[in-house]
C-alpha cells in the first residue's frame, strides 16, 4: 500500500477519515501539511474519544488527532522498529525524511516481516568475524563449564543472537575465531542443520588477541569486513554501518556508544590549598565508549604481524600515530548496544528484548 492512501489533513472531517480507515483496512492515518510534513496521527480510537467529547461526523480533526506521534526515519533498523511497535502497542509508524520531516512512507508489522524476508534473501558476502576465543572470566562460574558464546539468551545462544542480527541485514558469511573450549563451539554448530549462512572457523593454537587472530586471515579477505566481540549485541542496521565506512574510505570504523553515568555521591571540588570549593551532588557524566564492533578494510593487514599476539587497542594506537584521518567513529544510541560479557548486562538483556519476538 502506498503511503498516500493514509495521508490526511487537519481540515479533514471525522466522517472522511473513518471512510479512509475503512477503505485501507488500517487503524491509523497520518496527518500532514500541504508539503507532506508530519503533523501527527489519527487512530480509530482518537475518533471514538472525539465523539465522547461532543464531536460529530462533520467535525474537523484538528482538535482530536495525536500531535506528538511516534515516528521513524528512513533506513530504519527492522528489529528496533518492531520492538517500538510492540512496546507502544501501535499499528503503524510514519517514516519521515530526517531533515525535513516529510512523510516518505510508513511501516507496520506486516511490512517489517516482508522486508525481513526480502533482506534475508538478498545476501551480502561481506565477511563478519566474531571473536569467540576468550576465557569469559567475568562470567564465571558458568564459563568454567560452558564457553561464553554458548551462554543462553532465552531460546538461543549469545553467538546465535549476534549471527541472527547480521542475517536480518543480509549478511551470511561468518568467520568465528576460537581458542578456549573450541571443540564445544565447533560441535554446537555441527549440530545445526540447514544453516542458511556460511561459517569458517579460525582456530588459534594460542591466545592471540583480536588483531593476532585476524592476522591469520591475511590474503584470504579483500576489501571491507566486520569484527565483533562475542559479548557485543548490537541492534543496528549493519548495512548503514558498512555504507558509512565505505563512504569514509577509512581503515577502521569504530562503533561507539554514549554511556551516561551518575555518581551516587556528592563530589567534592577541592582547591589548590586543600580547601573545599564546592560539592557537586550526584553529578552525571557522559562518555562515548568502544562497543567492540568495528568495520575494517583489508589495508589493515599491512600493519599486522602474522600469528603474533596483539589487541585492537594496540592497532588503533599504531594507526593513529601514522594517520589520524583513517579511523572513523559511528555512534550508536540508547537500546542499540548491550554488553553481555558481565552479569548485569547478561541478565538484563532478555527483559530489554522481550518485545522483539
Image: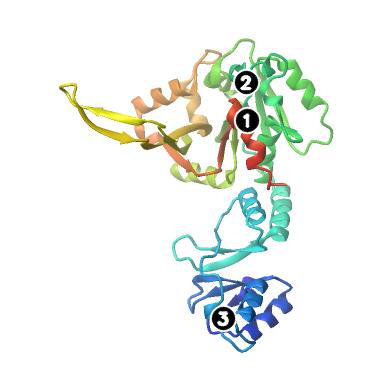
Q: Earlier in the sequence, mark 1 or mark 2?
A: 2
Label 3, label 2: how far apart the Cα atoms are = 55 Å
Please tell me which residue is depicted at 65% across the width and 85% down the height of the picture: 16
Near-viewer residue (246 or 6) = 6
Q: Is residue 73 above or below residue 253?
A: below
Label 3, label 1: how far apart the Cα atoms are = 46 Å
Near-viewer residue (286 or 201) = 286
- The x and y percentages for residue 293 are 54, 33
Is 279 on the left or on the right of 141, as rendered? left
Label 1, label 2: how far apart the Cα atoms are = 9 Å
Q: Helix, strand, or loop for circle 3? A: helix
Residues packed near mark 1 inside 10 Å, few (<14), some (14 to 19) or many (20 plus) = some
- The x and y percentages for residue 333 are 50, 44
Residue 82, numbered label: none
Q: Helix, strand, or loop for circle 2? A: helix
Residue 346, numbered label: 1
State whether residue 222 appears in this view.
no
| Residue tagged 3 | 61
Near-viewer residue (176 or 180) = 180
Quadrant where the N terminus lies?
Answer: bottom right
> How many numbered circles does the render carry?
3
The answer to whether mark 1 and mark 2 are in CB contact below 8 A is yes
Amino acid at each position: 500500500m502506498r503511503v498516500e492512501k493514509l495521508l490526511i489533513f487537519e481540515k479533514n472531517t471525522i466522517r472522511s477519515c473513518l471512510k479512509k480507515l475503512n477503505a485501507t483496512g488500517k487503524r491509523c492515518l497520518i496527518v500532514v501539511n500541504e508539503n507532506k510534513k508530519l503533523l501527527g496521527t489519527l487512530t480509530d480510537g482518537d475518533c471514538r474519544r472525539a465523539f465522547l467529547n461532543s464531536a460529530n461526523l462533520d467535525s474537523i480533526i484538528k482538535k482530536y488527532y495525536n500531535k506528538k506521534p511516534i515516528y521513524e526515519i528512513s533506513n530504519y533498523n527492522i528489529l528496533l522498529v518492531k520492538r517500538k511497535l510492540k512496546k507502544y502497542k501501535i499499528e503503524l509508524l510514519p517514516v519521515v525524511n530526517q531533515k525535513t520531516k516529510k512523510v516518505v512512507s510508513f511501516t507496520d508489522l506486516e511490512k517489517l516481516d516482508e522486508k525481513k524476508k526480502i533482506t534475508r534473501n538478498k545476501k551480502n558476502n561481506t565477511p563478519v568475524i566474531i571473536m569467540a576465543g576468550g576465557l569469559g572470566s567475568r562470567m564465571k562460574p558458568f564459563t568454567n563449564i560452558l564457553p561464553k558464546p554458548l551462554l543462553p539468551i532465552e531460546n538461543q545462544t549469545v553467538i546465535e543472537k549476534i549471527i541472527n542480527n547480521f542475517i536480518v541485514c543480509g549478511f551470511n558469511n561468518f568467520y568465528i575465531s576460537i581458542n578456549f573450549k573450541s571443540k564445544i563451539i565447533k560441535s554446537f554448530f555441527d549440530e545445526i542443520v540447514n544453516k542458511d549462512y556460511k561459517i569458517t572457523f579460525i582456530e588459534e593454537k594460542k591466545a592471540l588477541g583480536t588483531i593476532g587472530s585476524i592476522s591469520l586471515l591475511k590474503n584470504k579477505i579483500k576489501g571491507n569486513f566486520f569484527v565483533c566481540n562475542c559479548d557485543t549485541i548490537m541492534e543496528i542496521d549493519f548495512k548503514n554501518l558498512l555504507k558509512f565506512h565505505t563512504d569514509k574510505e577509512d581503515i577502521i570504523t569504530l562503533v561507539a556508544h554514549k554511556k551516561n553515568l551518575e555518581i551516587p555521591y556528592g563530589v567534592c571540588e577541592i582547591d589548590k590549598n586543600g580547601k573545599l570549593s564546592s560539592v557537586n551532588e550526584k553529578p552525571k557524566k557522559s562518555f562515548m565508549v568502544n562497543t567492540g564492533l568495528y568495520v575494517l578494510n583489508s589495508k589493515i593487514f599491512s600493519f599486522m604481524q602474522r600469528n603474533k599476539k596483539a589487541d585492537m587497542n594496540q592497532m588503533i594506537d599504531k594507526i593513529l600515530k601514522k594517520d589520524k584521518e583513517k579511523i572513523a567513529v559511528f555512534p550508536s544510541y540508547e537500546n542499540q548496544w548491550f554488553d553481555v560479557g558481565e552479569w548485569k548486562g547478561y541478565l538484563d538483556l532478555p527483559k530489554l528484548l522481550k518485545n522483539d519476538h
